[in-house]
Structures are given as structure tokens and as C-alpha cells.
Image: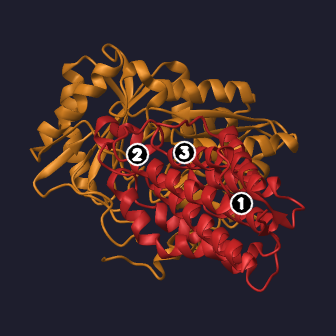
Chain colours: A orange, B red
Amino acid sequence: MQRIINDPDNVVDDALKGYLRASPTLLAPTDHPRVLKYAGHTGDKVGVVTGGGSGHEPAFLGYVGDGLCDAVAVGEIFSSPTADAFLEAFRVANRGQGVACLYGNYAGDTMNVKMARQMAELEDIDVKTVIARDDVASAPATQRDKRRGVAGEVMMWKIGGAAAARGDSLDEVIRLAQKAVDACSSIGVGLSSCTIPANGKPNFSIEPGHMELGIGHHGEPGIEVAPLTSADAIASAMCDPVLADQDFAGSEVAVLVSGLGATPVMELNLLYAHVADRLEAAGVKVYRTDIGNYFTSLEMMGATLTLMKLDDELKSLLDAPARSLAITQR
Amino acid sequence: MQFLDATHGKEILEELVEVIVENRNYLSEVDGAIGDGDHGINMAKGFRLCGESIAGQSLSLSKALGTLATTLMGSIGGSMGPLYGSLFMGMAKAVKDKDAIDAKDFGDMLAEGRQSLEQISDASVGDKCLLDTLVPAIDGYRHALDAGEDFPQALQALRHGAQRGCDSTLELEAKIGRAARLGERSRGHLDAGAVSCCLLLTRLADSTERRLEKAAA
């Protein structure tokens, strides 16, 4: 295992030490070792919290900042944070106007958030949730409630965070974050496996010369395993199910292409070239494109494609200022 | 009538810690086939932490199980933190203030653990999860008692039920957790939660049986 670590069992805690020392103007510690909060000043507003397993960096802590999330609960690699951690994140994010907890649809996260919400109720903290379900490969559109949350979560944090930053009420923040999630359709493609350091060996396998379309952020099996083909063909294979998921034709969209960790950013742009062709041919107007490592899976090779269908309301929130490790825009 | 001395909870708990820590890699391997391969790591971490926190103490069975529950809920997260945390918390509550546990108390303890677990999870038997081990184990235990068998015989039924239930997950299609997204392809693999639950119940039964024999001798 070629990894830069100390003790494989302490990777998350050791990494948090580094994050805190590297980004003191963005991230601050709390009373809970697995909860970080925004280090800057935020006035009275709805608190925005997220959380999830580690290994997806810059998610989730990279989205803590100005105009985004106020606190994050950090789990073990690919494993939900504890209910205690979510509760502490609710506490530090709460300014008396309630907390929007925006996270992805995974069994562990859902249970721990549920327990944390019950505990927060005893402390009179009003917590409402939006659960991202944007991965089209994980369940058909008719079973959207079963879908996983993937890179569409980035859009959810951006929209929800911007709404909270401009002073929207908790109900309004929740409505807009939900609207963002519902407007997103995503799909991933994996070219290689990834290794949790404490496990020491690959989590699953993708044979050399193959790729897995529809792969999840933890290597959950996708729609099909196929021979590795050209970037243009991969772009088409990703565009087909995404374009079929919602009626994007004639609409403006935000496009997010995220690497899964080990694919060079150059190749993400190379992949995008044909995605842009396909969108143009389908009559979809690209309003904005972001390409980079926004939501990863350790050192997996591959990429995710997310389309978010836009209207004026979502556009203004998408373009609102933000400052965090993963997103900085004026 | 046979009683389990419930004042030596720490010693019983140490055996549960041991069985999970010993099977860390095996559990991750089972999980790796259809899950994300971290079950052994997380369980071993939680149980090891619990083992460290009770070292040198003298604890009743209730206190020991309660410590295990809060350690798991507070330290391992994932799905297993809340699931096992609730199970052991329910068991701890059931034997609160008891110095000695008879066969009926033991059954009530397991039943209350199950109830507590079912309050936070929508899972049911057949979903390919730890309930597939837990429920047949508890049913086996209760049926044995109802049939007039004694404490050790009921523990034997508990072990059989747990093993049979755990084995049943091999052919089940996962309905819950990450493996659920595999649908049909989750068949042919054991569920990691069902396996760890089987290990824990088996060791609990072994440990209890040994203590009953010792008391009788």
C-alpha cells in the first residue's frame, strides 16, 4: 500500500490535525474531536450542517466556510459519523434560528442523524434535513427515495448555504436545498478500486482494461462493467442515463465533473469536451461548468458527472459568494 | 434453578471484546464482498475502546453492557454504532439492578435488546442484516424454555438459531444497507452484521454456559 500515513487506524484523526493547521481561517476545532466548524464570523442565520464518512475529500469538510456549511461531522473512512458528532455539529451551528442538516442517502448517516435530531430536540434545537438522492444509477427514477447521494450534494450545500447566508428562514433553506437536490442527476464511472488504509487491500476489484458505469462513491456496483473505451465514448455512456433522467432539453444547466481521486484533472477536462458536445446536441444550455476533485473516493480512478437543471432562483444562489477549501468565488 | 452471576459483567464483556477483535479481518473480508469492507475495522475499534475503558473495573452485567452501548454509539458511527448500541442498551436496561440472572431473565434481556434495536431501524427478518441472526436465535431460546428445557439447553438453542440465521443470509437478497443496491447480486454472500451478531451471541452463550457449569460444580 503506497500511502502517506502514520497509523492506518488513525488516518482520519491525523488528517484532521493537518486540515486544522493548514486552514485556520476556515476550519476551527470544537469540543468534539470529529466536529469542525467555520472559523470565521457568521451573524445570526440558519445554521447549515453536513457530515459523512471520510475518504471523499474535499467533501465534506471542504464545504465548511462562508456561504456554505457552518459545521461538519466527520466519520471514519466510508462510515457515518456518530450521532454524538452530528449533535455537536448542530450545537455549534445553531444561532437560534434552527439548523438545516444536508447529507447524503446512506443507511448509517440516516440513523445517526435521526438519533442526533432526537437529542437536539431535548436541547430545543430545531433541526430539519434534506437528503441528497442524485445518483441515477443507484435506483430508477420511480424509486428516487432509494437513490444514493453523490456529487449533487455539492450543489445542495452551495444552494442551501447561500440561502442561509442571505438570511432565509429554516423552512426556506430546506425548500431550496431540496429543490437543488431534485434538480440534480448524477452518474459515476470507475476505472479502478480504492483501499481503506486500515483494511490494507482494495475494497473491490475492477479488472485492468475495464470500467464500471454507475459505480458508487464507495465502490457500490453500478449498471454494468464494460471494456475501457475512449473518453468520448465514456462521456456518451455517462450522458445517456443522466439526460434520460430529467427533461433537460431547452433548459439551462450547471455541470459538475468531479474526479474520484486518482484521475488527472486534465482527463476530467478531456472527458468534458464530449459531454459539452452531447449537451449541445441535446439542446441543453450550459450556464456554468465546474471541473475538479469536488467529491472523491480515496484513490479511485474515475469521474462523476452531475447536471443541475436551473431556474433564476437557483442561478442566483449558485452564483452567490462563497469561501471554503473546495469552493471560493466572489 | 440455575443462575448466572451478573456481578461479573466485566469478565463476560471482555469475552465479547475478544471475539470481535479476533475476527476483525474476517468481518471486514465478509463485508468487502458486498459492503464497503469496514465492518471488522469499525467493530474492532469500538469493542477495543470499550475493553480499554473497563479495564481494572468491577462491573455488573448491566453496567458492562451499558458501557459497551455508549462506547459503540459514541465511537464507531456507521450503521453498526446505532444498531448495536441500541441492542446492548436495551439488554443493559433489562438486567438493571440484577445480581443473578435466571433463564427467563436472560431471554427477557435478549428480547428487550431486540425491541430497542427495532425502534431505530426499519429492518426486518429477511432483509439480510443482523436481525436475521438475532431473531431466530431469540426464538430458538424462547421455544426451548417453553418446551421445558433448562438454561444450558436453551443456550444451545440460542447458538443453533444464531448460526442457522446467519447462514440464511447467504442466499438472501439484501433489502437494506449498502448491499441493498446490489439487488440480486448480493446473493451468495453472508451479511457481515449477521456474522458479527452470530459471533457475539455464540460467545455470550458459551460464556454464560461455562459460568453456569462452574457455579454448579
Q: Residue at x 43, y 44 (%)?
A: B178
Q: Earlier in the sequence, mark 3 or mark 2?
A: 3
Labels 1 and 3 in the same subunit: yes
Instruction: Tell me how far mark 1 sits from mark 2, CA to CA.
Output: 27 Å
**Residue in the foreground of this view, choosing between B59 and B102:** B102
Look at label 3 and name its amino acid. Pro
Give residue A234's position: percent from left, percent from top.
17, 39
Residue B52 at least partly seen? yes
What residue is shown with label 1? B69
Which quadrant would residue B50 be assigned to in this image? bottom right
What residue is shown with label 2? B168
Q: Is residue A86 above or below residue A187?
A: below
The reply, left or right, for residue A227 in relation to residue A218 is left
Look at label 2 and name its amino acid. Ser
What residue is shown with label 3? B136
Q: Residue at x 26, y 26 (%)?
A: A241
Which quadrant would residue B179 be assigned to in this image? top left
Q: Are marks 1 and 3 in contact (CB under 8 Å)?
A: no
Label total for image? 3
**Residue furthest toward the right?**
B97
Q: Dot 3 falls on which chain?
A: B
Look at label 1 and name its amino acid. Ala
Q: Earlier in the sequence, mark 1 or mark 2?
A: 1
Q: Residue at x 36, y 76 (%)?
A: A3
Give residue A233's position: percent from left, percent from top.
12, 37
Q: Are marks 3 and 2 in contact (CB under 8 Å)?
A: yes
Q: Secondary structure at mark 1?
A: helix
